[in-house]
Amino acid sequence: MSAPLLDIKDYTLDIATFDGPVHVLKGINLSVNRGDTLGIVGESGSGKTVLVRSVMGIGPSNSAVEGGQITFDGQDITRLDPKGWARIRGIRISMIFQDPMTYLNPLFSIGQQISDVMAAHERAAGEGGSTKGARRARTVDLLDQVGLPNPASLYDQYPHQLSGGMRQRVLIAMALSGKPDLLIADEPTTALDVTVQAQVLDLIKSLVDKLNLTVIMISHDIGAIATIADRCAVMYKGEIVEQGRTADVLREPQHEYTRQLLSAVPDIEAKPARTAVAAACRERQPDAPATLLEAINLKKLFKTQSGGEFSAVSDVNLSVATGEIFGVVGESGSGKSTLARMLLRLIEPTSGNVVFAGQNITGLTGEPLRQIRRHMQFVFQNPHSALNGRHTIGDAVGEPLRIQTRMSRREVEAKVEALLDIVQLPKLFKYRYPHELSGGQKQRVCIARAIALNPRLLILDEPTSALDISVQAQILEFLQQVRAEFNLTYVFISHDLAVIRQICDRTIVMKRGEIVEHGNTEQIFTSPRQEYTKALIESGRKTSRAATLQAS
Amino acid sequence: AGAFERTDDGTIIVFGGRQAIPVLDPHVRYDWSTRMIQQAVYDALVKYEGDPAEVKPWLAESWETSEDGKTWTFHLVKDAKFHNGDPVTAEAARYSFERGLKLNKGVAWMLKDFLAPEGVSVVDEHTVKFELKAPYAPFLSFLPWWFVVNPQQVMANEVDGDYGQKWLTDNAAGSGPFKLGRWEPNVLYEVEAVSDYWKGWPQGDNRPAGVIYRLIREPAAQKAALQRGEADIVEGLTSDDYVQIEKVPGIVIQDHKGMTTFGIKFNTQKGPTADINLRKAIAYAMDYEALIGIYNGAASLETSPLPDSMKGHIAVEGIPRQDLAKAKEYLAKSAYPEGGITLDYVHVAGLEEARRIGLVLLDNLKELNIGVNIKPEQWPNMVAAGSSVETSPNMTSVYTTPISTDPDAVAYQYHKNSWGQYYAMAYYDNPQVSEMIDKARGSTSWDERAALYADIQKQIVADQPEVFGMLQNRRWAHQDYLQGFSFSPVRFTGEVDLYPLWIKEE
Amino acid sequence: MSNLEQTAGRPLAFRERHASQLRQLRLYSQMFRGSFSSMLGLTLVVIFLILAAIGPYIVPFPDDIRGAVHMGSRLLPPSSEHWFGTDEMGGDIFSRVIAGARTSLWIGIVITGLGALVGVPLGVIAGYKGGWIRACIMRVTELFLAVPGLALALAIVASLGPGLTNCMIALAIVWWPGYVRLVEAKTLSIKEELFVESARSIGARTPWILWHHILPNCMSPIIVKMSMDMGMAILAAAGLGFIGLGAPPPAPEWGAMVSVARSYMPDWWWYSFFPGAAIFLTVLGFNLLGDGLRDILDPRSRTR
Amino acid sequence: MLSFTVRKLLTVVGTMLGIAVLTFVITNVAPGDPARLVAGPNATEDMVETIRSEYGLDQPMVTQFAIYMKDLVSGDLGTSIVSTRPVLDDLLRYAPATIELVLVAMTLGVIVGVPLGMLSAVYKDGPVDHFTRILSISGVAIPAFWLGILLQLYFSVDLGWLPVSGRLPLVTRPPEMITGSLLIDSLLAGNLKTFNTALSHMILPAVVLSFPCLASILRVNRAEMIEVLQSDFIVAARAHGISSRRIVVIYALKNALLPTLAMIGLRFGWMLGSTVLVETVFDWPGIGLYAVSSALASDFKPVIGVTLLIGFFFIIANTLVDLAYAWIDPRLRRA
Ligand SMILES: Nc1ncnc2c1ncn2[C@@H]1O[C@H](COP(=O)(O)OP(=O)(O)OP(=O)(O)O)[C@@H](O)[C@H]1O
Ligand SMILES: Nc1ncnc2c1ncn2[C@@H]1O[C@H](COP(=O)(O)OP(=O)(O)OP(=O)(O)O)[C@@H](O)[C@H]1O
Ligand SMILES: [Mg+2]
Ligand SMILES: [Mg+2]
């Protein structure tokens, strides 16, 4: 084998911040040969993005290379001047970005943006510009290649007219327009729907095969890496702790962190060993009603901007038994959050009723509504924005107590400390601000806040989707503990089927605001009745099974 | 280079003034800028000229009065004609007086109490007769401000019986030495010389082709315009500017003693100033020299309520001058022996000198432990406040320019009938004085009147309804090549007789 | 984390309890100190505040502030005795300019204070409540905003009559809508934040949410705007003073001084120069300060 | 589209009526008495009364208001009691001067402000940036009237390069009025000399008026450029090898232009407001001066008229800005 296409040696990078330099990359060693597909996994903030951006020469502005070098095709590109970059960036190395929503200029048409890139390449290569028409033809060709329907008319459309998946395809087309030697994909699928994720991964895989590309792909989703990459590297706190053939790494992880990571991946195939919490719970509270929460013909219409109406949730009926974990799955936009908010009366249903513990709470306002809210609490999808940045953690956890009870200041303090204890956070955290906490810690705070009033029902709206996989596992486990401790009933919303299968007793599947399937979780997974459910499970499997297959 | 422009007809003089001319109609408005142009485009039966001002025959070549002083007959010149060629007839004169009286605006107040519209009649084509309701000595002294308009033109442009008011706002129907040229309200107003003016031109072939009255609102801009040669004559510079610019070669300052009196009117009916001792105290505390100083010497102290150049003026002895001892003496006699009060001093917003006099007053009254609250007010608001005893301020600074040279023009301001007018803000009430004024204006004998006015002046000074201030000089600055400037104190501040002006070209 | 656990046993010192706030403050002050223009602004504002506080007691000619007349020393050029020269009444311009700081400070505080006092509650209510309440408040606000403030203020003062109080009333009347718009927009976006919904889900009443969640999060832009507005209000008041509708004599108000001084151009340039420069420096100071505050408090809304 | 236009039109009319109500109320809170002013100093009470009744000032306020609103709906803005002319006529006479001044100043602000803002964003923390930052903060802080006076002092009086005030030298006959703009009219008339003099009169007031506007445009554009240059899609464009020039001048500028446009709309109204100061300093015969002199005479119909007109221009400007927005931003374009 000849020299590797990309060779990173002892690469060390510092970023200057207020608190002094942060060592973001520490002695990175990595090499990629022509035709390789390398996957990089690692938790959020481990330095994956910084690493690949450094390869492109677009790293953070206040960074300093402390040591090591990056060689691309025999050329040292560590300290290249802008002219030198012009010949490499986008032409020989190009990149697909994480979030297709923000990486396209909203004011220019798609075709224009792609053919601009082509023109730039031609100029850099000194080929002299081809005509506009020629570029247009090539652009349309490319759009076709990445599997976009109707590429000719797409040329003149603007990013906002496209769905997320389509935009990601456009970004891929753009990255391919220079026929690069090396393609870097930075979490190309995380911002997309489960079903779309699988399609995009398929596309990348097929392109790799067809065009014989060399690819570096970043993901924190081990399944995705396992699908595409034949080699993989694991990053942890700015270091590469392990690299090798993907199958090897997955089967026999060497590093402690890798092992942890792998064990945290929920397995859609695994039949969970369910503890009979529900039954136990009912035993402890024999007088509790069998049905805690019921929704009858719930419906929500939203006014769209063009003046029409849009039905986010239509005619949903469900009943949640005391002590069970009730799962809600469905693709993004299927109305899960809307449903959850209606159950809590955070938004008004257009029609229908919600019955909580035998009481119809639909018409409640003012004080009775406030009272009922003691008993049902919400844990939000995104812990980063569910906490007021100007309140300390102590304030946040104590807030429900101050609002709903007449506890004295000291009692509140004591209770807050107790709660922090329950969610396994040090007491000192009550003086901290949310931005000083990690995502997982913040989510614990949110849970502490939710259980402060000893509620009977917790509605969890994708409580882990904003968190890293390893953290997700912790939180899930923790939720189970809390439930046992407080006799809680959960409504658990997720788009991650593996998670649902792991913890839910009964599940409903939602599609475009309607329930398409409901029943026992196991039953749904083993014998789905609807095509939609099947497709959902299948695409979940694609990422997840690959991981387990290769691992086993 | 001069500002004037040479045209085929001659030169055009540029006059820089600070005040706009919104309405030109001679029977509707008058103020100095308006009247300057009115005087240029219209003629009246008679005209004021010279210093001291005298009434000269103009459209009327002669006139006579009846024995009882109630009937006046005027004989018009035969060759006068309006700008459109129509002859100026007795009917035109009659119509103009009727129009002025009926409109009841602007100049109407001067005659309306003595003359009804029907009192004016045409005797023959060139003779017009006025029959007054009662003898009125100052009658003639008002006539220079009653301009004659061309009835044909006016009536042709009448809308809804408005006596052509709308049209005359920025058009003219006169017979004067100039006719209207470019008329750009708020920017410039041009008058063009009438080459065959019926009365001819005193400067002969040197007569200008016209005059542009250009609005230059800022004193600094005026000065710059003069220095840069963008204006031939300007008015309204600050006193300090006049001093400064006098030294500039090629610039001449016209500095004349005027008739505009300045007084600080007390409210003699309400509040602390109803106390004559307090009024006297203030009058004696005032630093009169500072008043002159504010004008850089271009002013003279009042020696009587009447301006110096007015007929019948006497220098009243014992008119207060600064004397702190006396001031304190009077204060001790007043209801406020220790002072300790604060009085309002109201002046017209934007009037620089009045403001500064307020500062002087404030400074002087500190000696008496009296505070002064200087309040600038918009003119209409000040007048409105002054129109009732209740709201009339403690002290108001008032400039008054008598409209005629007759002593009645000033004396009547102290008559009780004038209450409500801005110049009577003092609400001065001395029945004896009112009686003497009435007597003097009805009398046809000058000697009798002169004696009455002397008494009136003494009594008013004794009653101290105001601090008698100073007479400010009238000043203009012009280029030395501007000739024919003639001053007459009866004109308003800033107003210049454009008729005799001309430019001497090297 | 281990040392944290150790300290948990004993009561915490102030420093420890407020470590986060202190760190934040340190960060702010470091960022602020790092910017030359912010420091310049702060310096100017501090000088201005000091002058406003003690100015009248330290000036060389305290009588001149209240309009003493010295006809003998009129319009003298700057000298060692009269640093900024004298005015048309022989008043010491230096003394009057220094004393003007207090007038201007007062103007600034009253106008921005009233503006914020009226505007912020309305903005919060409009943004949070929505519906017809919002429609009403915002219609009126937009109406005010559709007419440039200076033109409207001119009309108001002309009608009320000139004077410092009227001038401040007029400017306060045109000033509040700016706060309504700012706070309303901010509230609208904060309202959508999850933490507000979270507060609602635990049963918080509206006043609680407004006070504990919405208002604190609006505070940064409000503070920034108020500090900028201090300058802009002083500038606007000076503009009205210049037209002749501001503070009456002999109050040492900078705008009025320039207005009078304008007639004394160009030969007595110092008369208009120094009061004008005082306005400029003060407004500059508040603007720079506001800019600096924005950079550290509210970095995302740098646009306005 | 039609309903959109109609809606827009209705809001404009509504706002105008609102402004009329607002200004009428505001200008009538304290009673001034313009009738006295125009009646002249010596007028007797009955003469003042004549004028009051002629202008309806003797009616109760409510009646005056009703009459005013009724007239307004039929396009009559009332009569100025000082000039005795219909306010609308006066406005039509003075508006061109103001519009011309404001447009020139605005153009100046945009063509200087936008590129400078762009430059200082690109060379952030460089010398250009420092210079423009000082410029922009000073521009907002400097009192326009004072700047005007200083410039007059230096350029007109000291150097004698530019005229002190006014729109044209008085001996220059203005070109035949076609558009109302002296610059355009003189060009149309082919009179270059008049054009030059008109331009020289325009320079100082336009600079003074545009300075704060320039400053804030610069500020917004700089801030936006900095923000946009850090945004993801610019990073992407860089990564795809698009040249820096193109990125700055085309990709980023277009995005930064949106908030800048909003600022331009805002500043337009602001400028119209500051004409009351600048026109006073430069004796510019426009609506600002008209408003000031009318306000000082307690003649409120013209003040209301000017306020309405300014409000109207402001709405127009903002509508144009909205259109420009839609033109630049495809997300706002309607199907
Ligand atoms: N411009 C910057 N200034 C300061 N710190 C930075 C900057 N960019 C990145 N970092 C820090 O560098 C570290 C690595 O960031 P990076 O974006 O590479 O993480 P990542 O592995 O891509 O995470 P994710 O999975 O969330 O995308 C993080 O701790 C981050 O806070
Ligand atoms: N306030 C709103 N106004 C209008 N439409 C809304 C509103 N809230 C939600 N929607 C729409 O309702 C639909 C359902 O939204 P919802 O947030 O319930 O989806 P979801 O299943 O929770 O999706 P995700 O998995 O992305 O969180 C979406 O199409 C969304 O655009
Ligand atoms: Mg990343
Ligand atoms: Mg959701």
Image (cartoon, coloured by chain):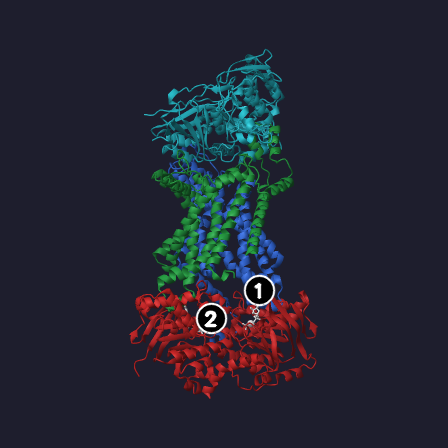
| Disc 2 residue crowd, few under 14, some 14–19, many 20+, Cα 10 Å | few
Q: Do labels 2 and 1 share a chain?
A: yes
Circle 1 marks a residue in which chain?
A: A
* Colour green belongs to chain: D
Q: Which amino acid type is marked by label 1?
A: Thr
Q: Name the quadrant containing residue B295.
A: top left
Circle 2 marks a residue in which chain?
A: A
Report if residue C171 is visible in the image: yes
Q: Residue C187 carries which label?
A: none
Q: Which amino acid type is marked by label 2?
A: Asn
Q: Name the quadrant containing residue D238.
A: bottom left
Q: In this view, does A495 lie to the left or right of D60?
A: left
Query: x and y percent of residue B34 in the render?
Result: 49, 29
Query: x and y percent of residue B353 in the render?
Result: 47, 32
Q: Is mark 1 on a helix, strand or loop?
A: loop
* Colour cyan belongs to chain: B
Q: Which mark is residue A304?
A: 1
Q: Quadrant of the N terminus of chain B?
A: top left
Q: Is mark 1 within 8 Å of ligand 2?
A: yes
Q: Chain A is drawn in which colour?
A: red
Q: What residue do we see at 34% from left, 25% from top? A: B505
Query: x and y percent of residue B341 in the render?
Result: 57, 35
Q: Mark 2 points at which residue?
A: A150
* Colour blue belongs to chain: C
Residue at the bottom extreme? A552
Report if residue A219 is visible in the image: no
